[in-house]
Image: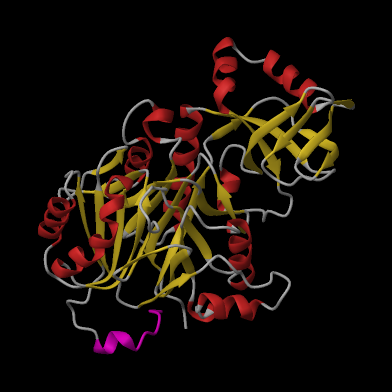
């Protein structure tokens, strides 16, 4: 049975879903705006997504007014990036790293409920208070919010609490986004309406549309799974495996000894720790990926006196951990596998893909340009893609939203009418 939607009675045949994209590498902001405007045309849109490289930071307050003079869209949202992801008029998707770039996407989304928001992060609602306080703060109705796009200024405080509060208030809505790129200009890095701002901005998405999340951490496990015997906050003090207990440093030395010379060389710069999350829901999308039971976190310090290791995540006795190695082949395999699984879950082809990738990915990881977009195009050949290289990526794993590093967080925008 076709889902009931009274809006269809009044919608003209021309009101179809549409995605128009443009990408410019002009070094002048005025020239870049002119190019994307000419490529996108004059037809109006429901939503404009704008991603701009930090090369244009000093000109940022001019950007949205210039675009709005030439293009028509009801809502405008975007941020700066350390690199820009976009799709040009010919349909070629590219990752423009460390160079001037402007990516603009115009979307017509019939049946969508779109609600932009902008919040300050200086004072957050109480995580121990009622969820309604957070819903009032975001000014989003949970009943009409199926997905959320979240962009955060790099100067914001309390980002993890912000993400936790978002989950508390909108537990059923997946969230995708990232931390914008920093710059030296005296204003923020976020774009909304016709303004530049700090804090956090975003978009609630509901109605007939949703974002399908894909989070690729890009690591493969090495060595055995260790149980945490002793820990304090984020410091591992004692681990055990195969009925043998030892300090984390001793355990790591045994793992490294079993690696090849090439792998040990990689481990100098690409060694991480996976922290098992037993609260993750069985059958979640990332259960299909390598090392999917682990949230990958940075190793941030070693105490040679007792062999303790500090990790960028709170840990507790009883949890399992496993060392992880980040390398290109594992990243390609995981991203491809997860995107294939997402494609199978989508009843219709996504209209576009949003990509928020770590600055540590790109050509530095893959050894060539367009690493992540090439993986996506091998799975969904004509997918328009837009996004940014971020200072931290936001995406769900196992039913909870996390702030990631070295990760590619995808949001596949798809038409998915709710049955009424």
- Compared to residue 162, the image places residue 286 above or below, namely above
Q: How is the image coloured?
A: secondary structure
Quarter residue 252 falls in? top right
- Which range is magenta? 1-10
Q: Nearer the viewer, residue 352 or 269?
A: 269
Q: Is residue 389 magenta?
A: no
Q: Is residue 148 left or right of residue 26?
A: right
User: How far from the left and from the top, in percent, is residue 361?
Assistant: 43, 35
Q: Residue at x 27, y 49 (%)?
A: 56
The quarter in which the N terminus is drawn is bottom left
Would you say residue 383 is visible in this rendering? no
- Compared to residue 293, the image places residue 170 above or below, namely below
User: How far from the left and from the top, in percent, is residue 394?
Assistant: 52, 53
User: How far from the left and from the top, in percent, is residue 93?
Assistant: 26, 44
Quarter residue 113 falls in? bottom left
Q: Majority secondary structure of the magenta segment?
A: loop
- Compared to residue 103, the image places residue 312 above or below, namely above
């Amino acid at each position: 049975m076709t889902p009931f939607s009274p809006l269809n009675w009044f919608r003209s045949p021309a009101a179809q879903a549409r995605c128009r994209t443009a990408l410019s590498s002009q070094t002048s902001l005025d020239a870049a705006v002119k190019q994307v405007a000419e490529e996108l045309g004059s037809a109006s849109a429901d939503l404009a997504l704008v991603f701009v490289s930090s090369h244009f930071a000093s000109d940022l307050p001019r950007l949205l007014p210039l675009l709005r003079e030439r293009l028509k869209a009801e809502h405008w949202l975007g941020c700066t990036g350390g690199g820009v992801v976009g799709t040009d008029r010919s349909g070629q998707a590219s990752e423009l790293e460390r160079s001037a770039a402007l990516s603009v996407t115009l979307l017509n989304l019939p049946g969508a409920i779109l609600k932009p928001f902008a919040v300050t992060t200086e004072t957050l609602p109480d995580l121990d208070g009622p969820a309604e306080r957070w819903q009032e703060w975001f000014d989003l109705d949970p009943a009409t919010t199926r997905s959320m796009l979240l962009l955060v200024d790099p100067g914001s405080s309390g980002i993890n609490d912000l993400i936790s509060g978002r989950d508390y208030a909108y537990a059923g809505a997946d969230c995708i986004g990232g931390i914008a790129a920093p710059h030296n200009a005296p204003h923020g890095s976020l774009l909304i309406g016709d303004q530049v701002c700090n804090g956090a901005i975003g978009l609630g998405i509901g109605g007939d549309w949703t974002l399908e999340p894909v989070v690729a951490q890009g690591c493969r496990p090495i060595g055995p799974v260790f149980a945490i015997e002793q820990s304090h906050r984020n410091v591992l003090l004692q681990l055990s495996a195969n009925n043998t207990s030892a300090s984390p440093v001793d355990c790591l030395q045994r793992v490294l000894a079993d690696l090849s010379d090439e792998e040990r060389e990689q481990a100098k710069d690409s060694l991480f720790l996976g922290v098992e999350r037993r609260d993750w829901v069985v059958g979640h999308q990332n259960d299909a990926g390598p090392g999917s039971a682990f949230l990958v976190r940075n190793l941030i310090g070693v105490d040679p006196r007792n062999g303790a290791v500090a990790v960028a995540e709170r840990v507790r006795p009883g949890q399992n951990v496993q060392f992880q190695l980040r390398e290109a082949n594992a990243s390609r395999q995981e991203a491809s596998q997860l995107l294939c699984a997402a494609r199978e879950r989508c009843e219709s082809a996504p209209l576009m893909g949003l990509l928020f990738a770590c600055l540590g990915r790109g050509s530095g990881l893959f050894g060539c340009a367009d690493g992540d977009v090439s993986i996506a195009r091998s799975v969904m050949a004509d997918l328009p893609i837009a996004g940014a290289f971020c200072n931290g990526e936001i995406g769900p794993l196992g039913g909870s939203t996390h702030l990631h590093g070295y990760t590619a967080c995808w949001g596949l925008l798809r038409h998915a009418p709710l049955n009424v």
